[in-house]
Image (cartoon, grey):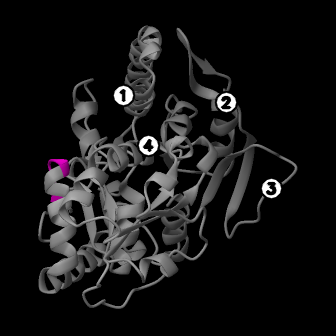
């Protein structure tokens, strides 16, 4: 998404100077715009009663800004902000992804659910989040504008005294699906980084709560769930004996998702953690695959509206009912597909999202 923002400004005749962090300074990717690379190091990384902070490029960045007469800085996410927040005489904008004090807590919470003995680490987590919040306050206060990619981040930042604005971010469409007729055996898909926070929550909810109800309401071997994604060995899925779930199939990483999308009536996302879900859901809105999701997904993406742009559920029982409704009601399903595509074009299509961003930062 960073690329899409930069590409938008480049196409609209802005003079772009990109400062990027890289693991290997010897291998510097070619770009369409001027790019200066700095060595990436561990920074804002939690470690027991502290945060590891090894990057300090403020002086170097300040010199580069003066050398090239830069009058506006857009910092993508909190690490980039930490390197420019104290630079003077330049307009400073920040774009934030998921807040680290949220992801830090929810990662602990998900691991704790599967291992109660991790309760001993809770004191680390709470103190680390205290340190994270102090850093966010320190880095964000001097910024001229704070943009968040998740609607829920507005209220979390407000609690620590930071005003922010949610803006939909650009997300390219890679394929578009044809509408499907009712399937004799409905197929659903779940995909993503399987070791990611959103996937941890979704996989746990699917196998522990959704699957037993599906067997009861639809019947054994009368539905199919296809799972695809990377990082299997680091995921909760690796701990599950899939042979005990004959309706669920794992394909590993699939380069062309449209193969599974074309076989599926919807994506399912039963994860109840309100982070780590937006990109995959926007992909489905753009491509024409209906979304069946936990209501918590709406916290980050306010464009998800039940029975208008998605099927949303509060409980596992309701989730299964929405899966059945989506597979049987072609009229409602077609309406949701149409509305979701409209939202994508109006909010997340790279050109329109770029214009929204440009208008806001130039106010």
Compare residues 140 and 297 and report the one nearer the observer.
297
The residue stretch that appears in magenta: 312-316
Marks 4/3 in contact by CB < 8 Å: the verdict is no
Marks 4/3: CA–CA distance: 33 Å
**Which numbered disc, 3 or 2, marks the residue that appears first in the sequence?**
3
**Which numbered disc, 4 or 1, marks the residue that appears first in the sequence?**
1
Marks 4/2 in contact by CB < 8 Å: the verdict is no
Image location of residue 159, percent across then percent down: 22, 26
Identify the residue position indicated by label 2 in the image.
Answer: 59
Query: Which disc is residue 28 wearing?
Result: 3
Identify the residue position indicated by label 1 in the image.
Answer: 141
| Residue found 13% across the figure and 86% down from its top | 331
The secondary element bearing badge 1 is classed as: loop
From the image, state whether disc 1 or disc 3 is nearer to you. 3
**Quadrant of the rendering where the C terminus is positioned:** bottom left
| Residue found 19% across the figure and 85% down from its top | 334
Marks 1/3: CA–CA distance: 33 Å
Marks 3/2: CA–CA distance: 22 Å
| Residue found 57% across the figure and 51% down from its top | 70
From the image, state whether disc 1 or disc 2 is nearer to you. 1
Identify the residue position indicated by label 4 in the image.
Answer: 200
Marks 4/1: CA–CA distance: 33 Å
Query: Which disc is residue 163 wearing?
Result: none
């Amino acid at each position: 998404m960073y690329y899409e923002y930069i590409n938008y400004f480049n196409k609209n005749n802005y003079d772009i100077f990109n400062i990027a962090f890289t693991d290997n300074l010897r291998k510097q990717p070619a770009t369409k715009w001027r790019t200066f690379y700095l060595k990436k190091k561990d920074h804002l990384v939690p470690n027991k009663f502290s945060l590891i902070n090894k990057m300090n490029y403020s002086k170097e960045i300040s010199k580069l800004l003066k050398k090239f007469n830069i009058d506006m800085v857009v910092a993508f996410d909190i690490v980039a902000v930490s390197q420019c927040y104290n630079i003077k005489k330049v307009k400073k904008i920040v774009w934030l992804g998921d807040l680290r004090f949220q992801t830090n807590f929810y990662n602990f919470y998900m691991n704790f659910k599967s291992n109660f003995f991790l309760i001993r680490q809770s004191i680390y987590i709470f103190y680390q989040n205290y340190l994270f919040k102090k850093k966010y306050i320190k880095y964000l206060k001097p910024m001229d504008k704070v943009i968040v990619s998740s609607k829920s981040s507005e209220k979390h930042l407000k609690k620590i005294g930071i005003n922010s604005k949610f803006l939909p971010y650009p997300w390219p469409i890679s394929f578009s699906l044809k509408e499907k007729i009712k399937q004799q055996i409905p197929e659903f898909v779940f995909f993503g980084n399987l070791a990611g926070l959103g996937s941890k929550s979704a996989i746990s909810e699917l196998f522990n709560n959704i699957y037993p109800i599906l067997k009861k309401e639809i019947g054994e071997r009368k539905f199919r769930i296809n799972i695809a994604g990377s990082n299997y060995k680091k995921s909760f899925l690796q701990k599950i004996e899939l042979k005990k779930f004959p309706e669920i199939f794992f394909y590993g990483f699939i380069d062309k998702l449209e193969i599974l999308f074309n076989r599926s009536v919807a994506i399912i996302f039963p994860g109840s953690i309100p982070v780590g879900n937006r990109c995959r859901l926007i992909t489905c809105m753009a491509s024409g695959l209906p979304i069946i999701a936990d209501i918590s997904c709406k916290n980050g993406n306010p464009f998800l509206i039940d029975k208008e742009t998605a099927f949303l559920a509060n409980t596992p029982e309701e989730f299964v009912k929405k899966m059945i409704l989506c597979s049987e009601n072609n009229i409602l399903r077609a309406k949701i597909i149409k509305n979701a595509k409209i939202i994508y074009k109006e909010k997340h299509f790279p050109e329109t999202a770029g214009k929204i961003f440009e208008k806001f930062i130039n106010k």
